[in-house]
Image (spheres, rainbow, N blue to C red):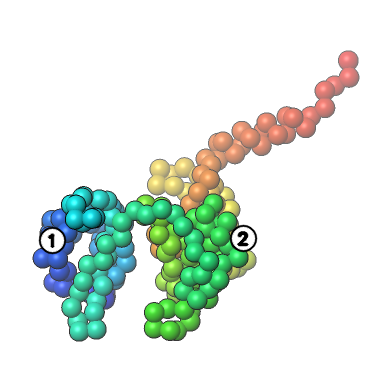
């Protein structure tokens, strides 16, 4: 069943994309989830080489692209080039604390939800992260993330679900990978990629070995 999107393929302004140097067949190389997000106005997952003019000089630069629907129904192309990572003092009506700036600079994830003001002047609850490819701040409304009851075969407790939904980190053991092997990892909502990310992977064999080593360290030598 085809999912509803804000725009459809027929509305993609291929003429505008070609002007910035992107061939119209790029859509055929998108995964279904990536295409769905692209048609919903989110940034592309990949970087594309686009034309740019700086001081009357023509350059080709890597950038993400996204579609933006105008009030008159037309669709424009927005370019998001790689930029220097910078966290402003204020963003979408929110004044950052030193701790929040440090989290965004160091973890590239705020680690919690905050209230931000959208372009329409309405306030909403958001996750906030940094795009790993362009270094842009990426806000994501919390309604776009649904924390599941189970992840990779492991049931989440209510406490774990609430912590994830609030933007925090949760360590989960005993998950099953595509290769059928058990592993553990730290989970957190990733605003930039609009999903729940995994980090700090550990295979169960590694965990068992570490536990065995810790146990052996704790054994006292027998008296002779």
The residue at the far top in this view is 224
The residue carrying pointer 1 sits among few (fewer than 14), some (14 to 19) or many (20 or more) residues within 10 Å by Cα, namely few
Residue 181 rendering spot, x and y as whole percentages: 47, 42
Please tell me which residue is depicted at 18% across the width and 78% down the height of the picture: 74
Q: What is the secondary structure assignment of the residue under circle 2? A: helix
Q: Residue 116, percent across and down?
A: 49, 75
**Quarter of the rendering occupied by the N terminus:** bottom left
Quarter occupied by the C terminus: top right
Disc 1 and disc 2: Cα gap in Å? 42 Å
Kindly give the residue lying farthest to the right in the view shown: 223
* Residue 166 rendering spot, x and y as whole percentages: 56, 68
Closer to the camera in the image, 223 or 111? 111
SS assignment at label 1: helix
Instruction: Work out whether 216 lies above or below 3.
Output: above
48 with respect to 200 (left or right): left
Residue pointed to by mark 1? 19
Give whichever of 109, 9 is nearer the camera: 109
Relative to 7, is 197 above or below? above
Name the residue: 46% across, 78% down: 117
User: In the shown orientation, is residue 192 left or right of residue 162?
Assistant: left
What residue lies at 43% left-to-right and 62% top-to-bottom? 137
Crowding near pointer 2: few (<14 within 10 Å), some, many (20+)? Answer: few
Q: Earlier in the sequence, mark 1 or mark 2?
A: 1
Q: Out of 166 and 128, give the one closest to the viewer.
A: 128
Q: Is residue 161 shown to the viewer in this render?
A: no
Q: Are marks 1 and 2 in contact (CB under 8 Å)?
A: no
Q: Which residue is mark 2?
A: 99
* Furthest residue toward front: 55
Residue at the spot 52% in from the left edge and 58% down from the top edge = 104
User: Camera-side residue: 191 or 105?
Assistant: 105
Which label belongs to residue 107? none
* Residue 105 showing in the rendered view: yes
């Amino acid at each position: 069943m085809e999912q509803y999107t804000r725009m459809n393929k027929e509305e993609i302004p291929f003429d505008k994309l070609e002007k910035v140097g992107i061939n119209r067949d790029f859509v055929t190389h998108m995964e279904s989830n990536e295409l769905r997000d692209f048609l919903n106005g989110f940034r592309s997952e990949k970087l594309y080489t686009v034309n740019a003019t700086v001081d009357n000089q023509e350059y080709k630069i890597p950038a993400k692209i996204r579609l933006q629907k105008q009030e008159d129904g037309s669709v424009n192309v927005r370019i998001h080039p790689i930029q220097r990572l910078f966290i402003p003092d204020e963003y979408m009506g929110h004044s950052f604390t030193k701790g929040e700036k440090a989290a965004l600079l160091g973890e590239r994830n705020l680690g919690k939800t905050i209230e931000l003001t959208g372009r329409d002047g309405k306030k909403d609850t958001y996750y906030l992260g940094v795009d790993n490819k362009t270094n842009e701040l990426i806000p994501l409304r919390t309604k776009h993330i649904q924390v599941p009851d189970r992840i990779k075969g492991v049931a989440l407790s209510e406490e774990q679900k609430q912590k994830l939904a609030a933007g925090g980190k949760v360590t989960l053991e005993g998950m099953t990978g595509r290769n059928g092997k058990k592993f553990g990892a730290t989970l957190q909502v990733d605003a930039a990629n609009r999903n729940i990310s995994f980090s700090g992977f550990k295979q169960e064999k590694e965990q068992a070995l570490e536990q065995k080593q810790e146990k052996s360290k704790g054994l006292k030598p027998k008296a002779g």
